[in-house]
């Protein structure tokens, strides 16, 4: 992938917002959109995608995130500050990861090893989530300030929810790295906000037609 478009960057950005939304939903309610979660999780195993959209199994894979992105940018009354905070934290951690060649290589190695296990064995969701959560703790949590997830204590204290939140955050890091690779810059979120919002709206509308 060498030539990137605004649509590519917005698609990757949708992946970040999707991960943040999934983490928020699990923390608050203990459940999340199953299709969106699977698309985000599977993006962690797309090592040589043909396009940005292919990372998520097609743009439909980030439909949930693109809707969230549009809402956050264009509907102040529905804006969720927790999602915004998670997105900023994911972008910052992704930048720290990209600055560490060892960190990037180790993360790739760990995910590749898990991908090979998935090919050889029938790994259940809970096993995959536990291993991905461990990869997140070992490779991402050590990079800087941890993302403090807020929600209902009952849900946060559930081990399965805790692992799924880490899986979502790891997918968010993947999307943030992809966004950077496709030419995403933090200043664009301020100075090109309308263009980003319009692109997100067009993509969302295309799903509905």
Image (cartoon, rainbow, N blue to C red):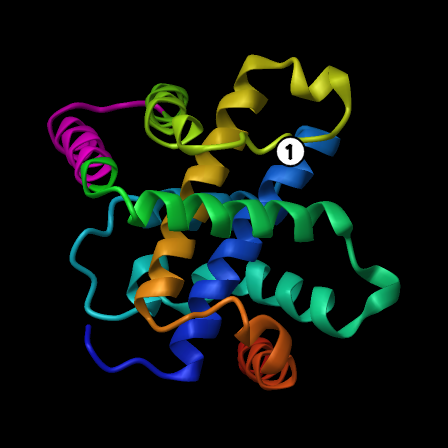
For this view, does 133 lie left or right of residue 121?
right
In the displayed structure, 186 sits above or below 80; it is below
Image coordinates for residue 99, horizontal then vertical, percent: 30, 48
Image coordinates for residue 122, horizontal then vertical, percent: 22, 24
Q: Which quadrant of the view contains residue 188?
A: bottom right
Q: Residue at x 24, y 82 (%)?
A: 3
In the displayed structure, 3 sits above or below 176; it is below
| Main secondary structure found in the magenta portion | helix
Residue 35 visible somewhere in the drawing = no
Q: Which quadrant of the view contains residue 28?
A: top right
Residue 143 visible somewhere in the drawing = yes
Image coordinates for residue 19, horizontal then vertical, percent: 53, 47
For this view, does 175 lie left or right of residue 87?
left
Question: Quick one: 21 or 196, which is closer to the camera?
Answer: 196
What residue did someone put label 1 on? 26
Q: Residue at x 57, y 33 (%)?
A: 147
| Magenta residue check for 192 | no
Q: Residue at x 65, y 84 (%)?
A: 194
| Magenta residue check for 110 | yes
Q: Which quadrant of the view contains residue 170?
A: top left
Image coordinates for residue 74, horizontal then vertical, percent: 75, 74
Q: Residue at x 58, y 59 (%)?
A: 64
Residues rendered magenta in the picture: 105-124
């Amino acid at each position: 992938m060498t030539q990137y478009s605004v649509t590519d960057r917005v698609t990757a950005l949708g992946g970040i917002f999707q991960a943040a939304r999934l983490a928020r939903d699990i923390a608050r309610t203990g459940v999340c959109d199953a299709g969106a979660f699977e698309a985000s999780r599977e993006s962690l195993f797309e090592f040589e995608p043909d396009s940005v959209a292919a990372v998520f199994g097609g743009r439909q894979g980030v439909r949930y995130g693109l809707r969230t992105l549009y809402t956050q940018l264009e509907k102040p009354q529905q804006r969720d500050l927790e999602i915004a905070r998670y997105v900023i934290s994911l972008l910052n951690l992704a930048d720290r990861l990209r600055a560490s060649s060892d960190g990037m290589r180790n993360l790739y190695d760990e995910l590749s090893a898990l991908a090979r296990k998935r090919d050889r064995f029938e790994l259940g969701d809970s096993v995959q989530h536990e291993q991905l959560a461990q990869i997140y703790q070992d490779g991402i949590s050590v990079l800087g300030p941890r993302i403090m997830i807020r929600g209902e204590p009952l849900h946060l204290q559930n081990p399965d929810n805790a692992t799924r939140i880490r899986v979502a955050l790891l997918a968010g890091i993947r999307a943030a790295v992809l966004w950077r690779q496709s030419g995403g810059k933090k200043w664009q979120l301020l100075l090109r906000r309308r263009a980003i919002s319009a692109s997100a709206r067009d993509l969302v509308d295309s799903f509905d037609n």
